[in-house]
Image (tube, rainbow, N blue to C red):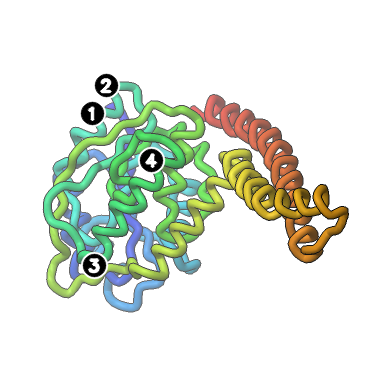
Amino acid sequence: MKDLNVAVLVPCLNEQQTIGAVVRGFKEALPEASIYVWDNGSDDDTRLLAVQAGAEVHVVNQKGKGSVVRRMFSAINADIYVLVDGDDTYDPGDAEKMIKLLRDENLEMVVGSRIGEVDRFGHSFGNRLFNRLYRSLFANQFTDIFSGYRVFSRAFVKSFPAVSNGFEVETEMSVHASQLGLPVCEVDVSYRSRPPGSKSKLRTIPDGFNILWAMFLLLKENKPFLLFGFFSLLSTVFSLLLGIPVVVDFVETGLVEKLPTAVFAASLAIFSLLGFSVGLILEAVERSRLESKRLVYLQSP
């Protein structure tokens, strides 16, 4: 890898207990790589310890992992990027095989699928649930879309829009790869418990809701006809269930005896037509956006 410029990017917040070990581990595993620690508003000695361990430290004041990733990807130029959490739960020794796989198979992203120790039950259960949801909505490429250990090509990094601000940025990365049909893969990596004194920044319920909302927005932006078509179909079914008895009564008696029901059924029919039309329009817009994103990716070095 001496012929390549490899950058190890470490998003970090209050990781005093672990950041030194992470930096030293990657300096040993990838001696030719540049190590960058991006501090996201820590209030302990994280920055000092990162510098002492040999990393170049940057500061991002806007909270959220997505905000940090956006700054990382725009500021650092390299041939290969290694993105890893600063909590010392990933093995730096796995980076070399991930980089080799990226090069040998001409891939754009390699995702480290975690094996070994797991976080508390809520995180583990939510991870499995969201992975199944992702595979059903987008693609069957990944089994661990929330992995914090990834290797990217320069083309991926420089074409990735990074719109999300929080932990949902990992989902956005996976959707970006699936949407453009990029060559990617997963590889098993070791995953261990957090060292004593290190606490997860992931909040099970609030961040789970944010990720679910992000999936909804990504579905709206990337598969709008599927989303609006579903609501249109649902409205059509309820409109028919409510409206048919009203029509039958009118044919038999010449009267609309259930006027509120008739109005509601007609409203649902109108909503169904609008949803179908909006879905078609947004699908055309999305195709244009996809073509633009594809051109940006092809122009990336």
How far separated are the C-alphas under marks 4 and 1? 26 Å
Res. 104 mark? 2
Contact, mark 2 vs mark 4 (Cβ under 8 Å):
no
Residue drawn at (20%, 71%) of the image: 198
Front residue (pair 132, 91): 132
- Which residue is outermost to the bottom? 43
Contact, mark 2 vs mark 1 (Cβ under 8 Å):
yes
Res. 135 mark? 4
Is the residue 176 above or below the residue 258 in the image? above
Res. 100 mark? 1
Front residue (pair 44, 100): 100
How far separated are the C-alphas under marks 2 and 1? 6 Å
Label 1 SS: helix
User: Of callouts 2 and 4, which one flags the residue occurring earlier in the amino acid sequence?
Assistant: 2
Please rate how many residues cluster around mark 3, counting C-alpha atoms within 10 Å: few if below 14, some from 14 to 19, many from 20.
many
Res. 49 mark? 3
Kind of residue sitting beneath label 3:
Leu
